[in-house]
Image: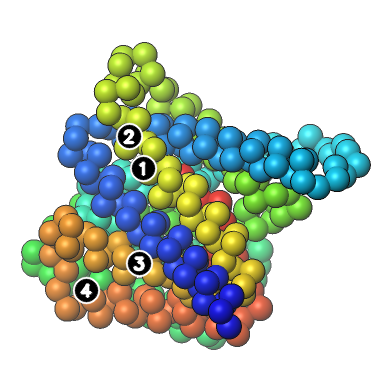
Amino acid sequence: MNERIKGGLLVFTGAASFGLLSTIVKFAYANGYTLGEITGTQSFSGMVILWLLYMVSKSFKRKHKPEDPVVIKSVTSWWKIALSGIFTGLVGIFYYQCVRLLPASVAIILLMQYLWISILIETIVFKKKPSRKQLLLLSVVLLGTLLAGGIFSQEIILNLKGIIFGLLAATCYAIFLMTSGRVGNDLPVLKKSALMITGSCAITWIIFPPIFFFNGIYWEGLAFWGLILALLGTVIPPLLFSMGIPHVGVSIGAILSAVELPVAIFSSAFILHESVDYIRWVGVILILIAIIATNLKTKEPIGQSKIKDDCIQ
């Protein structure tokens, strides 16, 4: 039981760090940085840190464990993993753009729409007919979204472009969960994460060339924000999930990871001072109920079980 409690705390902490991302991004925008600068430096910092951690762990294992025979793997294994990382890069771009246009508390609600989008993708692409339970949970999520998103609040003015970017982020996140759960599972967590964030960094730099390395912005403060966002969204969560989930199990781990939603709402309300009335909290609770119900006693949790062992950005 003691190990289960420790594992649960690790998963809880990892998910909570995800919930702080939107608030940190708001502060980065307030300091004058652009979408390309924020996403570009975050993915770069995450890539450097994860590759360094992988190299250190690999060196440590060689010193303390007999080296296994070298097995030559197909080159497709690494590029498929890096390719799947493109989707997490797009999640960061779309989500942070959504955060720029909408309150952080609304942006995280839109990202949670990956739940029903996953069902839709499975129905269209994999011809997998949704169960009655999934349809019921879908209706709960949609109702919770209307309430939590502030549709009935006169204090919130919703931006159509922001909503579109939020749904694009949710779609890419659903695709990322599906692809990441199918490739690279035979590799160490750190190596898989490093390959994915490399793909994320590549697509980010293609869309937003990293000119911040040459105009002096990076060393004047941008590096700090990139490091903080990389730690909270790229490094700490996957490490804590990989350590904690084996002790609590996939379903419980997925349920605990849902704490990302209330943490994001709390931080936006108490740090950013965004308006979050009781009606919106009811919507948040409904979405949480749907997430928990999705992962209770199900063989195939929606979207490959909301375990973010690799990332947001």
Marks 2 and 4 sit apart, C-alpha to C-alpha, by 33 Å
Residue depth check, mark 1 versus mark 4: number of the one nearer the observer: 1
Marks 2 and 4, the one that precedes in the sequence: 2
Q: Amino acid at mark 1?
A: Ile
| Secondary structure of residue under mark 3 | helix
Residue at 18 percent across and 63 percent down: it is 269
Residue at 30 percent across and 74 percent down: it is 284
The crowding category of the residue bearing disc 2, from other C-alpha atoms within 10 Å (few below 14, some 14 to 19, many at least 20), is some
Q: Amino acid at mark 4?
A: Arg
Residue labelled with disc 1: 228
Q: Amino acid at mark 2?
A: Phe
Instruction: Specify the farthest residue to the left.
Output: 154
Mark 1 near mark 2, Cβ–Cβ under 8 Å?
yes
Residue at 48 percent across and 39 percent down: it is 46
Residue at 58 percent across and 83 percent down: it is 1
79 vs 164, nearest the viewer: 79
Number of the label disc, if any, that sits on residue 261: 3
| Secondary structure of residue under mark 2 | helix
Question: Percent x, y for residue 10?
Answer: 49, 65
Number of the label disc, if any, that sits on residue 258: none
Marks 2 and 3 sit apart, C-alpha to C-alpha, by 25 Å
Q: In screen coordinates, is 310 left or right of 288?
A: right
Up/down of 225 relative to 13, above or below: above
Residue labelled with disc 2: 224
Marks 1 and 4, the one that precedes in the sequence: 1
Up/down of 257 relative to 172, above or below: below
Marks 1 and 4 sit apart, C-alpha to C-alpha, by 29 Å
Marks 4 and 3 sit apart, C-alpha to C-alpha, by 12 Å
Marks 2 and 3, the one that precedes in the sequence: 2
